[in-house]
Amino acid sequence: MRLPRNRSLIIAVIAVFLVILTGIWFSTPAAGAQDKGSKPPQAAKLPRLVDVGADKCIPCIMMAPILEELKKEYAGILDVEFVDVWKNPKAGQKYGIRGIPTQIFYDASGKELDRHMGYISKEQILQSFKKLGIELKNPEQKKKR
């Protein structure tokens, strides 16, 4: 059986179809995706910051030392988690991510309070929690007084 003469047209149509499917897959939140005000899969006992990004995206790379600093300085006060959606694409669906990096702010009961997309400084993160009614006390500052 021979393929039709317009084989390249068939291949182009298939390629376009696959691109469209991929776009729909990444842009459609999965069933149970996190909406503002919903609870994450595992409710935390501490306020939580989830940074959804990738280890090779430039703003995400810039965020890495900030996240590590927050993890160390606010250990036992704030849970900080990084989710790499390039290594784990289903996580992007689970959190309903539209762009990276995205920071998701949760209260201690696990309720999503806010989202920010793009680079955000440590000071802006702490200020965001404060605006959301969560005052994060740095244990290092207490020791210095």
Image (cartoon, rainbow, N blue to C red):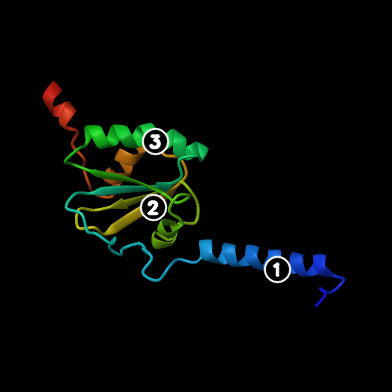
Q: CA distance from mark 1 to mark 2?
A: 36 Å
Q: 10 Å neighbourhood of mark 3: few (<14), some, or many (≥20)?
A: some
Q: Which circle marks residue 64 in the picture?
A: 3
Residue extending farthest to the top is 144
Q: 10 Å neighbourhood of mark 1: few (<14), some, or many (≥20)?
A: few
Q: Quadrant of residue 33?
A: bottom left
Q: Which residue type carries mark 1? A: Ile
User: For this view, does 117 lie left or right of residue 130?
Assistant: right
83 or 73, which lies in front? 83
Q: 10 Å neighbourhood of mark 2: few (<14), some, or many (≥20)?
A: some
- Give coordinates of residue 16: x percent, y percent: 70, 65
Looking at the rendered image, the disc whose residue lies closer to the viewer, 1 or 3, is 1
Q: Which circle marks residue 115 in the picture?
A: 2
- Give coordinates of residue 92: x percent, y percent: 44, 57
User: For this view, does 36 lie left or right of residue 79?
Assistant: right
112 or 80, which lies in front? 80
Give the vertical position of 50 relative to 33 (above or below).
above
Element type at marker 1?
helix
Q: Which residue type carries mark 2? A: Arg
Q: CA distance from mark 3 to mark 2?
A: 18 Å
Give the vertical position of 144 relative to 61 (above or below).
above
Q: Which residue type carries mark 3? A: Ala
Quarter of the image with the N terminus is bottom right
Q: Along the polypeptide, which appears first: circle 1 or circle 3?
A: 1
71 or 138, which lies in front? 71
Q: Which residue is mark 1?
A: 14
Residue at position x 24%, y 53% in the image: 107
- Give coordinates of residue 137: x percent, y percent: 18, 36
Residue at position x 35%, y 33% in the image: 66
Element type at marker 2?
strand
User: For this view, does 134 lie left or right of residue 22?
Assistant: left
